[in-house]
Amino acid sequence: MFNYVWFRSDLRVQDNPALHSALTGTAKTEVRAIFYVTLQQWQEHAWGANKIGFVLQCVVELQKDLATLNVPLEIRYGNTFNDCVSDLCQYLQQQNVCGLYFNKEYELNEQNRDTKVIRAFDKTAVKVVCFDSQCLIAPSLILTKQNTPYTVYTPFKKACYEYLYRHPVKLISIPRAQNTKVAAFSIDPKLQKYLQNPILKLWPCDRNSVSKRLEEFCANKIDQYQEARDYPAFQGTSTLSPYLAVGRISVQQCFTAALSCNRNEFAVGNPNIVCWISELIWRDFYKHIMWHFPDLCKGYNFNRKYDKLKWDKPGKSLELWQTGNTGIPIIDAAMRQLVQTGWMHNRLRMIVAMFLTKNLLIDWRHGEKFFSEHLVDLDLAANNGGWQWSASTGTDAAPYFRIFNPITQSEKFDPNGKFIKQYCPELEDVSLKALHDPSCYLTAMELQMLGYPERIVDLSASRQRALSYFKNL
Ligand SMILES: Cc1cc2nc3c(=O)[nH]c(=O)nc-3n(C[C@H](O)[C@H](O)[C@H](O)COP(=O)(O)OP(=O)(O)OC[C@H]3O[C@@H](n4cnc5c(N)ncnc54)[C@H](O)[C@@H]3O)c2cc1C
């Protein structure tokens, strides 16, 4: 008899309730693991090569981790989630399977896929067991007194605090190894091209590297987080987002690590640590919102009033934004960071998103898609939440009249221009004033000689246009 653990965005052996539960069940039941590569479905979800490569790299590492527990991980293939459902059901019925264990995913297509699997095994001998582990608190557990979802972050956070006081987070240990022989399964050679992506070298995902990243952040950086997190030249954030997005590390592990630096407190104590924990709670917030409002997975505005907005046609300016050629160095450096590393600093994500949606009046969905195609940490809920926050169409979003000025942001958060120079080396030798705002301080001829573009839009006029556009809606 076998129990199967179906891995998806929980690519870890530690703090994994599905794996733990399968392995600590009856001793006579052998445990095997399975992972589905669904390339077409992933591409339909706008996953780019970086995210796909990162997931596959983590699956390879997971296979090694599972081998130490004598659990074989089989990689199977299907184009779409529907293929995956029919293959999984057929395959498990051919084996002598008694249980299927998995941790829930909260996106709409993923939920529909799981519902089909649960229905297919209903009234069969296969017991399907699923767990909530993707969030600090499962989405169904945090509701207002009226039993409605929270749509504003601060009261949501307070409700989370109350819940966490009553239900302290407990990590689940790595289960004991079983006594079976493990056969190695390899990744289809056709997928090797994804694993050869040079960006993956920036994001090592063996267990040791991932836990070291958390440990080093807690030992050296968390104490300055509140201020340092806004300066892209200074690596003041944890850079754990890719690992959290695929579940190579759990949010519970991050939370408890932070707690242990703050005398086990999450709402009081060291303000830097409280601040970092509140970012973990933002992650939960957007996941809860997506679960309660599944239309977000279909690309709708959270605030349907904005359906009436007529965005500009994307055209050339979208391309210049994507390629880091807007003539505004902080925006261009940020976009080049995204393309070159698969990641972008949070402050910069907000600046470039607001510039696209407000100064260029381009639909946030174009920005969301481009981010999806490049981010190694792509997470539908956080990406959609971040884009709709910036576009003012989202839940608890930036009010439409609060439009960032990218030059002021640049002077404030990259005061020495260190970050800009890293990604726009053509501006290395210009004065600091010109570095932040070249079109204002350099002539067209000087810009041409540097090989840097003129600014594509007048910031003040485009700001006014956006203000009246949103106001008159
Ligand atoms: C337009 C836009 C798009 C975004 N797209 C994504 C995305 O696809 N995937 C993603 O993980 N984050 C996204 N974010 C949120 C945030 O920018 C990243 O989580 C953060 O930059 C990751 O860096 P870090 O791991 O060093 O974060 P830290 O500052 O160390 O924070 C710790 C963790 O908290 C979570 N977190 C932090 N800030 C946020 C936030 N605002 N919303 C939700 N979770 C948060 C992340 O999981 C992060 O790893 C987006 C933000 C914006 C404005």
Image (spheres, rainbow, N blue to C red):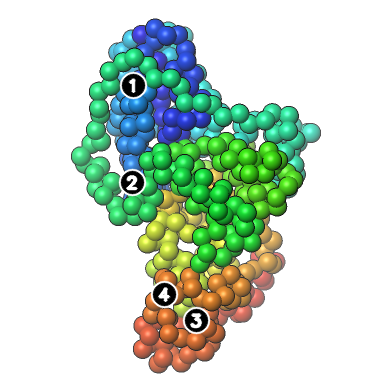
Q: Helix, strand or loop at disc 3? A: helix
Is 283 rendered above or below residue 85? below
Dot 2 and dot 4 residues touching (CB under 8 Å): no
Which comes before the other along the chain, label 1 or label 4? 1
Q: Is residue 74 above or below residue 37?
A: above
Label 1 residue SS: loop
- Disc 1 marks which residue? 70
Label 4 CB less than 8 angstroms from ligand 1: no
How many numbered circles does the render carry?
A: 4
Tag nearer the camera, 1 or 3: 1
Q: CA distance from mark 2 to mark 1?
A: 25 Å
Q: How far apart are the alpha carbons under marks 2 and 4?
A: 27 Å
Q: Is residue 425 visible?
A: yes
- The CA span between labels 3 and 2 is 35 Å
Residue at coordinates 37% horizontally, 62% vertically from top-left? 340
Q: Residue at x 65, y 57 (%)?
A: 226
Looking at the picture, how far across and down is residue 118, in whole percent? 47, 20
* 294 relative to 357, above or below: above
Disc 3 target residue: 435
Mark 4 lies on residue: 424
Of pointers 2 and 4, the one earlier in the residue sequence:
2
Residue 325's label in the rendered image is: none
Amino acid under label 1?
Answer: Asn
Q: Residue 407 or 304: which is nearer the viewer?
A: 407
Q: Amino acid at mark 2?
A: Gly
**Residue at horizontal 39%, vertical 20%?**
177
Of pointers 1 and 3, the one earlier in the residue sequence: 1
What residue sits right under mark 2 in the picture? 53
Which amino acid does the dot numbered 4 rest on?
Cys
Judge the density around disc 1: few (<14), some (14-19), many (≥20) Cα neighbours within 10 Å: many
Q: Are marks 1 and 4 in contact (CB under 8 Å)?
A: no
Q: Secondary structure at mark 4?
A: loop
